[in-house]
Amino acid sequence: MIRDKIVFSTKEKTLKQRLLRETDTSLQKVIDICRSAEITKKEIQSMQSVKCDTSSSMESSVRVIKSSPQNSPVIDTTKKQHEKCRRCGNPHAPRQCPAWGKICAKCNRPNHFARECRSKGRVHEVAAEESEGEDDFYFDSIYVGNIDAPHPQDSAWFSVVNVEGSSVKMKLDTGAATNLLPHKMFPKLNNQPQLRKSKAKLTGYGGHDIPHVGKVLLHCTALGKTQALEFFLTKTKAPPILGLQACTALGLIRRGGCHDSMPVETVTEPLTLDSIKSEFQDVFEGLGRFPDPYKISIKPEVEPVIQPPRRVPMNLHVRLRGKLDEMERDGIIAKVDSPTDWVHNIVVVEKKNGDLRICLDPKDQNQAIRREHFQIPTYEDVVSRLGGKRFFKILDQKDSFWQVELDEDSSHMCTFNTPFSRYRFRRMPFGISSASEVLQKRTYKAFGDIEGVHVIADDMIIAAATEEEHDLILLKVLKRAREQNIKFNPSKIQFK
């Protein structure tokens, strides 16, 4: 199913045609084809951009003279090429600005670079790339966030910290993995330790460099605790920042936890198909039943119809009788001896495994049924909510329509003819026009409040970013199914 969603949701026409032409496509093969197409597209775009840059540089060296009458002035475009652009800050040929179409890293507005941004608010998202310092110290990923606002104390936490004998008001940033101090504040400290060089490269969120002059070890005291903390001296206007580790070491913040009496559901080891079948064996056996029975609503102006019996091929009589007896034993149908207002025919369908499926043919009654019109999501709706997910599970309800019980009046409305006797459906049959909406509504009511669960008729997709999160969601679904007596088909589980 995931393979089909990838094929039909792709927007590239040529890629979709190629996937549809493949006769034997597994999920891994579809993923490989899509990745190959994506890499090819990026290479083509890169080649085109290089070609455009080369042609623009050649044009910039040519003096263009517009043909004009004898008394008209000559227009020289080379003069404009040496003027500084207000969007990118560099001279270039007309209509060749590299900032056009780009998003500013400071104000998130289009068509200019951050260095030419005129907005007042500045965003300093600092990240340090992996690099090696003189003391073999590595920075894997450092993120420091700060927003210059008119009243920063309204949107952030600040605390006064004693730094080398001087009181400094610092911002507590739990999203930062290091500490920052503006280099202009360093000379104002009572004690000034030796400044060390640093080869760490600090880059902003938008890719622009954040200059710094080095790093220093400062002794900080707060709430009676003293710690030696490392700071980067940056050339920014941001306030001093204490990162997560520094805030925790000084006791300025502490990690919150759950109350001792609050149960926390965890998974000790990854779930397997055999383990869930063993632990939840009752969920995969028998015929389920949703809590609320379904009442078929009929338009009052429609007259009931009794259809004449439809002949069934003789070679199906024995198998049909056996299927009817089985359905009667399971409580799906019941014999009818009294007169009923509605009598329908049936359609016998042979499944791939050789079993027979008996469907109702209520063509007249479907015109009279008042539907509930509960929206069923499309595959595109579900795919759009699967971004960032890496672990998936697909569960299929076992005999999904038959898990919806009919009330007594609705059961007699679903009476049908056979060559042997008349029967009535006690469970919702295949064929009535409102069946899919009724099943979607009841399934969503049972599982829709569980985050990470997506319901499409009788299929249920579980999607999560991590394996542990996936297993927790699966456990919630199986426990809910056990509580409400809903059954799944063990042979149709698509596991992770």
Image (cartoon, helix red, strand yellow):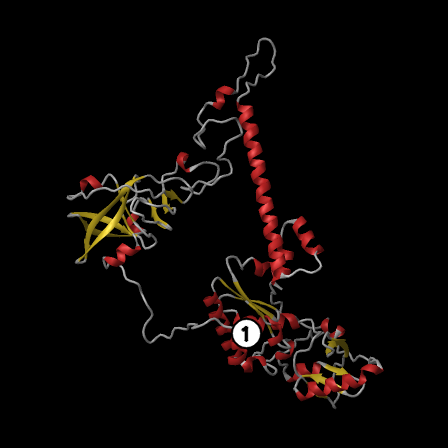
Q: Nearer the viewer, residue 487 or 180?
A: 180
Residue type, label 1? Leu
Q: Nearer the viewer, residue 136 or 93?
A: 136
Residue located 48% across and 61% down the image? 465
Q: Is residue 65 placed above or below 27 in the rendered structure?
A: above
Instruction: Return the x and y of residue 30 as percentages of the image width and height.
Output: 63, 57
Instruction: Return the x and y of residue 324 as percentages of the image width and height.
Output: 73, 85
Q: Residues within 10 Å of mark 1 (few under 14, many from 20)?
A: few
Q: Is residue 326 placed above or below 347 in the rendered structure?
A: below
Tell which residue pokes out farthest to the top in this image.
Answer: 70
Residue located 75% across and 76% down the image? 350
- Please give left or right for residue 215 compared with residue 112 in the image: left
Residue highlighted by disc 1: 273
Q: Is residue 252 visible?
A: no
Q: Is residue 479 placed above or below 231 in the rendered structure?
A: below
Q: Indicate the secondary structure of the residue bearing disc 1.
A: helix
The quadrant where residue 71 appears: top right
- Please give left or right for residue 197 compared with residue 439 in the image: left
Q: Is residue 399 visible?
A: yes
Residue located 60% across and 8% down the image? 70
Instruction: Return the x and y of residue 12 as percentages of the image width and height.
Output: 64, 49
Quadrant in which the C terminus is drawn: bottom right
Quadrant in which the N terminus is drawn: bottom right
The quadrant where residue 191 appears: top left
Instruction: Return the x and y of residue 200 as percentages of the image width and height.
Output: 34, 44
